[in-house]
Amino acid sequence: MNRRKRSTNSTIFRNIRSKLRQADYSRDISYLLVFTFLYKYCSDSLKDYFLSAIEDKEITLDEAFANPMYREMFRNDAFHMFGYYINSPEAYIDEVINTKYSDRFFLSEFYNAFRENIEFMPNSNYGKYFGFLFNAFKRQINIAKLEHDSERSLLYKDLIYSISKLDIYEESFPFREVFNQICQFRTINIDHDPDYINFILTELVCASKSSPMDVYNPFLNDASSLIRLSNKFSLPYGKSYGKGYDEITFCVSIVKLLMNYFDLDNVFLEYGNAIDSVDINGASYDVIMSKLPHVGGWSSKPMSKAQNKEFAKIYRRKKLENVLSSNFKMDEKSFADDSQLNEALESLLEKMDMEFDSQNQFSGEYESLKDSEYLFLINLINSLKKDGVMIVALSQSFLFKNSLETLRKYLTYENNFIDTIISLPDVLGKYSRPEIICVFKKNKVDDNVLFIDLSQDFNAKKAQNSSHGIIRRNLLLDEKTVSRLVSTYAKKEIINRYSNVVTVSEIVKNDFNLSVSRYVDTFEGEFIQLRDLAHEKKEITSNIKELNKKIDEMMKELDINF
């Protein structure tokens, strides 16, 4: 009997997984793993291309690098095709491991070989993002300390060696999927969106836009939503935007985008919180898609108007300082000591605050929106292009929470932004928190809202990757369920006990309550008229009185007293 041969990457993955289970959680191991996967991918991608370029030249790679003509050709091709260039054959990962692995200070030499020998085109996003990664690694990985901890140092060296033996071109268990699975471990502990959310968001975006050019995920996490959408369209679309506020997750998102063939010069990411500021270089978008964080509940408190404004001011100040630092080589001491510079910055920030307030002109009953924990939601809608669509997953409390009634009025009656609301099955969520998908559009031609109740009529399946036998814990909706959902959304169909189209005037009558159950009737039992029920209750009460009267008479005849 022929047994299927286990893939090289699958075998190595299990070895890495075994080592990680033995390791105690620490931030340095998270950053070291991300650094090593990045190094491996960049190194092997370049080296394989260079070797193919000289395959028929009867020359070794070392000889080619020693030749100025080949060296310049390698450099130009690398910048054009990959966005980066490793300038020394001794700095490729397999060479570093072959020559330095037994050295006492291998970890230092390994880190420096990559960081010191990689080059980028001037002002490219590749240089910007790799610079962010290297700075994060430097802050979080205390290499000197590790090298004095022989047991931990040996574990990290073993992990580096194992990762270096992975095949970045294997198809049965792709290198990027190995990295993705490693990132699911508690060792790295990143924030990631559930598969079922990404699946639904992607399908709805495809039903809304045939060719999105500018896509923004304001709560990027590990960039899996952007990657899934790119795979759906076969090639990376136009420009991609995102924000992330957890450093290790932000680092992972950059590496994942690179491994999934995104041109980082068309990717615009910011390390920051979209709740504080949704803006990225003043851009506007065809599509905004994201799972929104749980706000205003147990995990966070709504900010006051003053706090909201102060957070935004601090964030804008930081952005200005970053621009001055990168373009004019200023440092923190300059910002602290130069009083004229500080006065100029404060004056500019005051003007930016005035512009910020003018863009959010809420008055009268809408004044409270300035303090809303969902102010960022309004700002996101405002950043859409005229025909843009925003599809987000958020807490179901958004639909009926009393404090958000004014916001719901603003989004429906005042601006007619809400297009569709979909309730999701509780069983899909890891913590069984009720969730919804909400679709916002700026170019609606009617005042109708489509409600779809997916919480009752659905089929789910386990998310898995059969190539290496790992089954994730979360569930997915099956293709038939999602296909029906997308068809109903696209056609705006009314289906008994499944979907309904409701006018804004009806929503007004319901005090802007947007609960799906209010507009989609899924009750399957026999209805009882309240008038009949009241009559029956009256009759029962009368019968009870008659019965009590008879009992009293019988008790008197028997001379029984209580």
Image: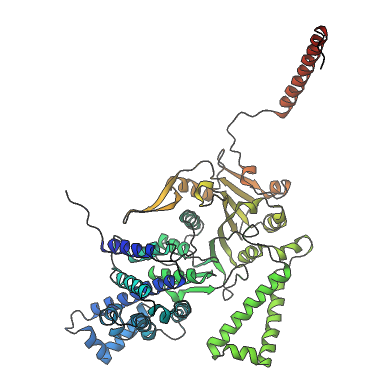
540 horizontally vs 57: left or right:
right
Quadrant of the rendered structure where residue 62 is?
A: bottom left
- x then y, percent, for residue 338: 65, 92
218 horizontally vs 7: left or right:
right
20 horizontally vs 283: left or right:
left
Quadrant of the rendered structure where residue 345 is?
A: bottom right
- x then y, percent, for residue 82: 36, 77
At horizontal 69% and vertical 66% (from top left) the residue drawn is 303
The answer, for residue 359, to whether it is visible in the render is no
Quadrant of the rendered structure where residue 87 is?
A: bottom left
381 horizontally vs 246: left or right:
right
Give the camera-side residue of 231 and 458. 458
Q: Is residue 533 above or below residue 426?
A: above
Give the camera-side residue of 57 and 17. 17
At horizontal 59% and vertical 52% (from top left) the residue drawn is 420
Q: Is residue 146 above or below residue 495?
A: below
**Colouring convention used in this rendered image of the protein:** rainbow
The answer, for residue 403, to whether it is visible in the render is yes
- x then y, percent, for residue 32: 40, 73
- x then y, percent, for residue 230: 43, 64
